[in-house]
Amino acid sequence: MIQFITENLEKNPNLTFVEFSNRKYSYEEFFYQVIHSARILNSYEITHRNLIGIQIENNLEFLIQWFACNFLGLTSVLLNPKAYGEELQKYIESVQLKTLITNRKSIDQLSNYKLDLIFIEDSPSISLCGNELNKFNWSVDDVVTIIFTSGSDGIPKPVELTISNFTSSFYSWNSEIQFVDDKIINFLPLHHISGISPIFRGLLSKTPIHLINKFQINKFINYCKINHPTIVSMVPTVIYKLLKTKEGIDCLNSFKMILVGGGPSSKNILKTCLKHDINIFITYGMTETCSGISGFWIKNNKDKLDSVGKPLKDVVITTKYTSEEFSQICIKGNMVAKGYFKNNKFNYQFKSDDYGKYDIDGFLYLKPLRNDKIISGGENVNPIDVENVILEISGIIGCCVVGIEDEVWGEKIIAFITRKKNIEESLVLKHCKKRLLDFKIPKKIIFCVDLPQNELGKINRKLAKKLIINSEHI
């Protein structure tokens, strides 16, 4: 990764690499920051190829430490800055992590872990001028970083990613997007593949990156008015918030491309985007594939809104059966990760937990994960089937259906719903009775402002179940 910084530095040192908090950092300025941090890390005498965790809230500092680790030949493990307690312990144990770069304010939360802590606020007592540095020479197949899966449907897994994975993913995307005179704006968390992959796209295409620490709707709109970014990655919930106002719609309209992933998008949201002529590109991917591997422009494919599009260039997605049946999908390509940490090497092909099928036009459609299945009254219920019926009701924006343990039903079906206007529970149930078999009809409707979701905006059924279990009203 660091070699792409140095290559751009040699060719155009004054070119802007990243902008953060209204300050632009050229490749020369950013590299200086990386070298300074690398000297500090080097004073701790960490052995080449050792794992080192990064858990930092500030996105610019996160990036600097990421590249500093890469400069020294350290394999970085990207951690959620908000992860503590049992969750962080699972991350630490899964990769046998021993060293962590973090903020000093986190010292109390980290005091119970057996970790060597490096605080970014501290400088070593040695003279940095005399601290000799040698840039580590990575091979394209070395594991440069480890990123955890979101874990919304299970235990997060540590995914080993190589330089080859990142570059292959970039070239597939560049074939689709063709980066020319673009500006990327990125507010997604950098410890996720969806947040770190735009950094690599900007780096390889020499596209400036506007980096934002946290999405705040009014600040985002004003920022876009001033800086005119052209490409952004969003989740459906963010688009929904922006669609509520004229200023938000104008903001969405200003982009050349809005990449939408992180879970199925509501048809109502997509149809509203079509109505306002917004440039939406639906994308499907995962940490194991180093970001998106398929997609499509909704403007050009208005009848494919349930699809995840066609495979990108140099990506092969295969299914076992014909277009009449769903089957487990297999993804092949150089963007497929090396494997999970010390386990299950992929050899450039990955069997996903997702099930899919192609239509006659070559568009891929996904079936929900097997562990989403609800068993109610002895009958199997696909929650997506129930959600799709509820989303047919005008004024309903989003829906999340889960099954909760129940003495009578085995699992009782509960539906979380977000709405535009005052829609009564009786209307929802009346519609469900017309379209669903009795055992599929929700036993309880919960109206909410936002659906239970993780920090990326992806529907989180596990969280939804916790909210219900902890509620005194269910």
Image (spheres, rainbow, N blue to C red):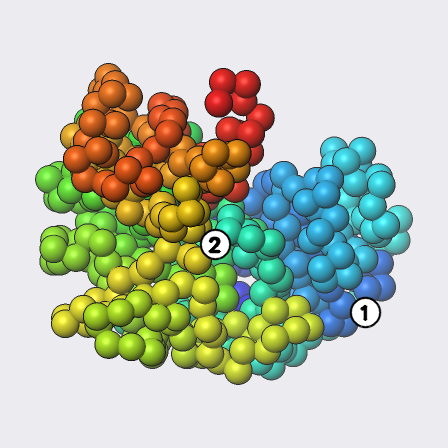
Real-space Cα distance between discs 2 and 1?
41 Å
Query: Around disc 2, counting alpha carbons within 10 Å, would you say few (fewer than 14), some (14 to 19), or many (20 or more)?
Result: few
- What residue is shown at x 55% (from left), y 45% (from top)? 59
Percent across and percent down for residue 401 are 38, 39
Mark 2 residue element: helix
Q: Position of residue 375 (x, y in %)?
A: 43, 47
Query: Is residue 90 shown to the viewer in this render?
Result: yes
Q: Which mark is residue 346?
A: none
Q: Residue at x 16, y 57 (%)?
A: 304
Graded by Cα atoms within 10 Å as few (under 14), some (14 to 19) or many (20 or more), the crowding at tag 1 reads few
Tell me the amino acid under the disc marked 1: Thr
Q: Nearer the viewer, residue 460 or 285?
A: 460
Q: Quadrant of the N terminus?
A: bottom right
Question: In which quarter of the view is residue 296 placed?
Answer: bottom left
- Helix, strand or loop at label 1? It is loop
Which residue is disc 2 drawn over? 371
* Residue under pointer 1: 47
In the rendered image, residue 428, in percent from the top left (x then y), is placed at 24, 27
Position of residue 258 relative to residue 28, above or below, is above
469 sits to left or right of 325: right
